[in-house]
Amino acid sequence: QVQLVESGGGLVQAGGSLRLSCAASGSIGSINYMAWYLQARGKQRELVALITSGGSTVYADSVKGRFTISRDNAKNTVILQMNSLKPEDTAVYYCNAYTILVNYWGQGTQVTVSS
């Protein structure tokens, strides 16, 4: 079992920044990669960024150059630094931990970007 606790969402004006954190606990050795997804109202959940256990990263085209995913192995935490935020970034953001057997999700944190 893996438990994920997210923090850092909120309301920000366009052009501003937010930092999301996801703390993992439990069977963290089983995690292959961790990721952030977003789900806007009425839309499907989609990948924002992921980071592998080796530190490789992948980003959605819509966030390249604006968002950075990183990990603090000592704290078992994954960070999503979001800069130059746009109103279209408004969504619930979910932390994800992928293992071979199970895909784990956090509870989600709301990010709202006002124009």
Image: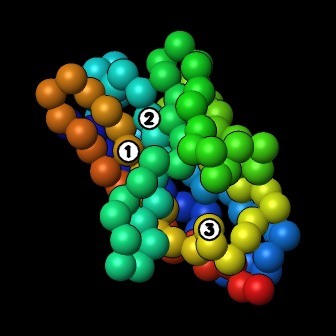
The answer to whether residue 81 shows anywhere in this view is: no
From the top left corner, tell me how far across and down residue 100 is, in percent: 21, 23
Residue shown at the point (46%, 40%) measured from the top left: 35
Which amino acid type is shown beneath numbered disc 1? Answer: Asn
Which amino acid type is shown beneath numbered disc 2? Answer: Met
Q: Quadrant of the C terminus?
A: bottom right
Say which residue label 3 marks.
89
Give the camera-side residue of 73 and 37: 37
From the top left corner, tell me how far across and down residue 64 is, in percent: 70, 43
> Disc 2 or 3, which lies upstream in sequence?
2
Cα distance between the residues tagged 2 and 3: 20 Å
Q: Quadrant of the N terminus?
A: top left
Task: Choose top left, top right, bottom left or bottom right for residue 87.
Answer: bottom right
Decide: marks 1, 2 in contact (CB < 8 A)?
yes
Relative horizontal placement of residue 16, taking residue 30 as reference (left or right): right
Give the camera-side residue of 101 and 61: 61
Say which residue label 2 marks.
34
Cα distance between the residues tagged 1 and 3: 18 Å
Say which residue label 1 marks.
96
What secondary structure is found at the residue carrying circle 2? strand
Circle nearer the viewer, 1 or 3: 3
